[in-house]
Every structure is written in C-alpha cells, then in structure tokens.
Amino acid sequence: MPRGDLFPDIAPFETGYLPLDNGHTMYWEQSGNPQGRPVLFLHGGPGAGAGAVHRRFFDPNFWRTIIFDQRGAGRSLPLAGLTANTTPHLIADIEMLREFLGIKRMLLFGGSWGSTLALAYAQAHPERVTGAVLRGIFLGRPIEVDWFLYGLQRVFPDVHAAFANFLPEDERHDLLAGYFKRLTNPDPAVHGPAARAWSIYEGSCSTLLPSFDAVSAYAQDPSALGLARIEAHYFDHGLFLPEGGLLAHMHQLRGIPAEIIQGRYDMICPAQSAFELAVSWPLARLTIVPDAGHSALEPGVRLALIAALERCRALT
C-alpha cells in the first residue's frame, strides 16, 4: 500500500564531525536502522545544508540514512568557506565519509544541486553506487545558470526585479559578478544583505504557489550566507564539472538504475534537463509531477520521492 506522506520526526542515532583538508570540517549524522540499507542524502544549493526534515523521506525501519553538510554549508565549518571548495573536493569528501562509516555501496538521494553532485560522484565511483533517486535535475550547464540569473524574469518579473535592483544600475548587466563581489566581502554589513537578497530570490521561485515558509527559510541568517556565497562561487567557476559536462559521461552509469522525479512547473530547474538526463540513462525512470514546482516538500514531489524509494528497496 503506498505511503501517504513523510515519516515521523526522528533523531539521529549517531552524529560527528570529520576533519577534512584545508581547514574544513564536515558535519555528518546517521538515522534510521543501523543495520539497514545505506542511503546517502545530498543537499542542494550548493551551500544550502541539510535539515531534520530530510530524515523523514526514509523509512527508519529499512534505511540507514546518512546525511552530511557539504563544505561551507550548514553545520560544517567554516561556514561559507570557499577555500578548496570544488566539486572534486566534495566527491573526495563523500568517499572519505563512506570509508569512515564502513559502507561498501549505497543509494544516492539528491535534489537540485544534490542531483548534480550525485551524478558527479556516481560517474567518478560507479562501483560504490547501487542506484539513485534524483529530484529537480540540475546539470550545471551554462544555459541553466543563465536561466537562474536572467531567464526567471519571464515568469517572476517582480521577484527578479527585486533581485536585480539590489545592485546599482551600472552593475545589473552582470548580476553574478555584482553579487559575488559583495558576497565575498568580509564585512557582514556588505555580504549579509546580498546573501538575503540572493536567497529570497531563490526561495520565492522554488514553489508552484507562493510560500511564506519557503521564503522565510531561505532568508534566515546565517544559512543564507552559506547558500548565496557558495552558490555564486560555484556558478562563477562553471560548477567545477568535468570536460563536456555530466551528460558526456553518462556511459559510466549504464548499469546503475535511477528514479528521476521532476515537478512540471519547476522554475529553478526546468524539466528539460530531467528529460535529457532520462533520455541519456537507459535504466532511469522519469516521473513528472503535474502540479509541482522545485521544492522537495511540495505534496506531489514528496509523495513521488517516497514511492521511488519504495521501488529502490530491492537494489543491492
């Protein structure tokens, strides 16, 4: 019988901090069944961090759920740190965590930037991946970054105007440069307002219908700084992805099954990317939720994600 909604709140059975390189420290936690099937949650952003609600996608009787905050994000330290913060570093961090926890193979679960990182990790270490459940697909291509920075004004002209008008008029021709300059300024009076403006813009476009709760969550200090600064850093460097992008390396995943969940009206990560990914991945099943935007917490998306996880129970 299909489950109706998220699982109840659950506390981790283990938490810790794992020292990395270049002064970074990773927060990690495990919840659910210590002897269960391992699943690794990859949060979005980059820089958004994970939260308690993310544990609730996973049946605690079946899954051993591993959640961590990526470099500079959430509870990892230093907050919003950009030194040695690249996609290859994050892939290496996942490998370090996997080895530290004694996990041989695991299911990957990620949305938005989490789908990007899941694909990058799986292409680097396909032998460590049993399958993937991915949502709100972002492939990190220039056209997708350009859509986020400029294309969204076609659907959210008022929200985009507030985002652009935060900058002086003579800087609005290059929104990324204008924001990145402020977000990397050490003065909180400079980077704080820029981080809130960036994060409110993203939160305002993330749901099918306006959601005060979503916008408020994105705008909270200090998490807004982690999201905005790291996101701008990654955008400014082409997401640190391999030559040719992720689609050029899909042959690495030919034996790995996947569930792709996509909101039809996802404005942050339009459905074209999910469709192109599914076409290039023979073992992928694409589910388009007809009444949803980008957020994993929209009713149709979360139900589709839970159903996808149920179908993944047999993967070993």
Image: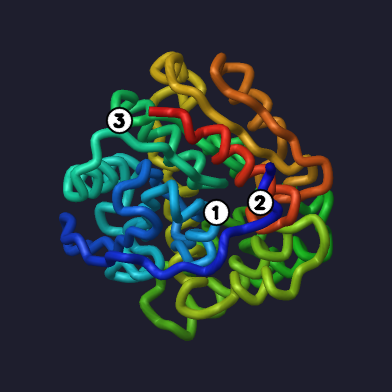
Question: In this view of the protein, can residue 79 be seen by the observer?
Answer: yes
Q: Along the horizontal axis of the image, is 49 left or right of 79?
A: right
Q: Amino acid at mark 1?
A: Phe
Rate crowding at label 3 as few (under 14), some (14 to 19) or many (20 or more) other CA atoms within 10 Å: some
Q: Amino acid at mark 2?
A: Arg
Query: Disc 3, disc 1: CB below 8 Å?
Result: no
Residue lying at the far bottom in this picture: please name it. 189
Mark 1 element type: helix
Q: Along the horizontal axis of the image, is 19 left or right of 127?
A: left
Q: Which mark, by number, is residue 57?
A: 1
Establish if 117 lies above or below 128: below
**Label located before the other in sequence (3 or 2):** 3
Q: Amino acid at mark 3?
A: Arg
Establish if 14 lies above or below 148: below
Coordinates of residue 233 in the picture (x, y in percent):
43, 54
Q: Which residue is mark 3?
A: 128
**Label located before the other in sequence (1 or 2):** 1
Establish if 176 lies above or below 290: below
- Residue at the image point whose x is 23% and y is 66% from the top: 16
Query: Disc 1, disc 2: CB below 8 Å?
Result: yes
Q: Which residue is mark 2?
A: 302
Mark 3 element type: helix
Rate crowding at label 1 as few (under 14), some (14 to 19) or many (20 or more) other CA atoms within 10 Å: many
Which of label 3 and label 1 is nearer to you?
A: 1
Spatial CA span between label 1 and label 2: 8 Å
Coordinates of residue 205 in the picture (x, y in percent):
73, 58
